[in-house]
Amino acid sequence: MSGEIHFSDNYRDLCQRDGTGAGFQFEFSCSRCHDTWRSPFEPYTGERAATWLGKGTDAAWQLLGRAGSGLKSAADGLAGAGWGPARDKAFERAIGNAQGHFNRCGRCTDYVCGRCWNASQGLCLHCAPDTAAEAMAAQQRGLNDMASQRAYAAGQQAGQGYDITTARQLVCPQCGTETRGAAFCSGCGHRLAQSVHCSSCSAVVPDGAAFCPGCGTRR
């Protein structure tokens, strides 16, 4: 089926094989926005007849003996054998109906719904975007880009007054609270990023050091 090739990636088989609700239905989707359209449900009369016959098997068994069971088996066999061809024909009809609800792009060959179709160009909106929409989108991108550039420039200017030499701790060593470079911890009040000086020579003693690196005095 040539139509099946075009819809091979954007349809869903909703057919039901068994029971009184047996029948054929297919759901097709737009390749661009993925909105869906379902074909009308077509009952599969062969399976429905077999199901109704099966409901009367007990009575038939009593009245007809093995003949009643044979009737049910024969009906099941006919229903099973007819399912495939019936499904294929239903699918062909569904594709024919779906082609009335979708448009095939001459450039990318995708099937799209009416909202995703540029009728004046005969192409989908992927291949031939709406000019007015693209112009508005471009204006918004330009606005956002310029606002970002100005904000970056303002940040650079503000950064001129930022003291980059002051030591800062982003996590409090006492309680583990995130401090974001504050002078004191908001969790426990610990004074942050303060260098420890040797009491003898005033040299800076690194964290964890047991002795002063300047004079050897024990901390």
Image (tube, rainbow, N blue to C red):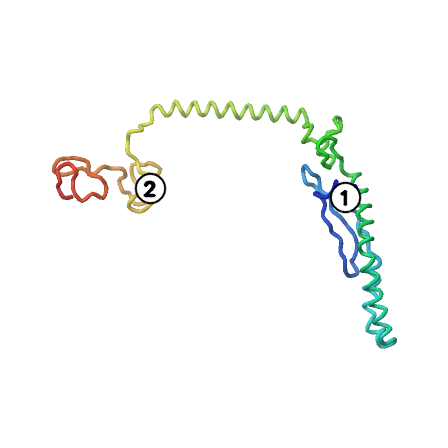
Question: Within 10 Å of the Cα at label 2, are there few (<14), some (14-19), or many (20+) other Cα atoms?
Answer: some
- Residue 178: name its quadrant: top left
- For residue 48, side relative to residue 10 (left or right): right
**Up-down relation of residue 22 to residue 37 (above or below):** below
Could you tell me which quadrant the N terminus lies in? top right
**Up-down relation of residue 142 to residue 208 (above or below):** above
Q: Secondary structure at mark 1?
A: helix
Amino acid carrying label 2: it is Val
Q: Position of residue 187 (x, y in %)?
A: 32, 44
**Up-down relation of residue 184 to residue 155 (above or below):** below
- Residue name at image x 74 percent, y 26 percent: 121
Q: Position of residue 70 (x, y in %)?
A: 85, 70
Residue 193 vs residue 104, the one in the foreground? 104
| Cα separation between marks 1 and 2 | 62 Å
- Residue name at image x 83 percent, y 57 percent: 82
Residue 163 vs residue 100, the one in the foreground? 100
- Residue name at image x 68 percent, y 27 percent: 130
Could you tell me which quadrant the C terminus lies in? top left
Q: Secondary structure at mark 2?
A: loop
Q: Position of residue 112 (x, y in %)?
A: 72, 36
Amino acid carrying label 1: it is Glu
Q: Which is in the foreground here, disc 1 or disc 2?
A: 1
- Residue name at image x 33 percent, y 36 percent: 181
Quickly name the residue at label 1.
4
Quickly name the residue at label 2.
171
Q: Position of residue 200 (x, y in %)?
A: 11, 38
Give the tally of numbered discs. 2
- Residue 30 — which label? none
Question: Within 10 Å of the Cα at label 1, are there few (<14), some (14-19), or many (20+) other Cα atoms?
Answer: some
- Residue 159: name its quadrant: top left
Q: Are marks 1 and 2 in contact (CB under 8 Å)?
A: no
**Up-down relation of residue 180 to residue 165 (above or below):** below
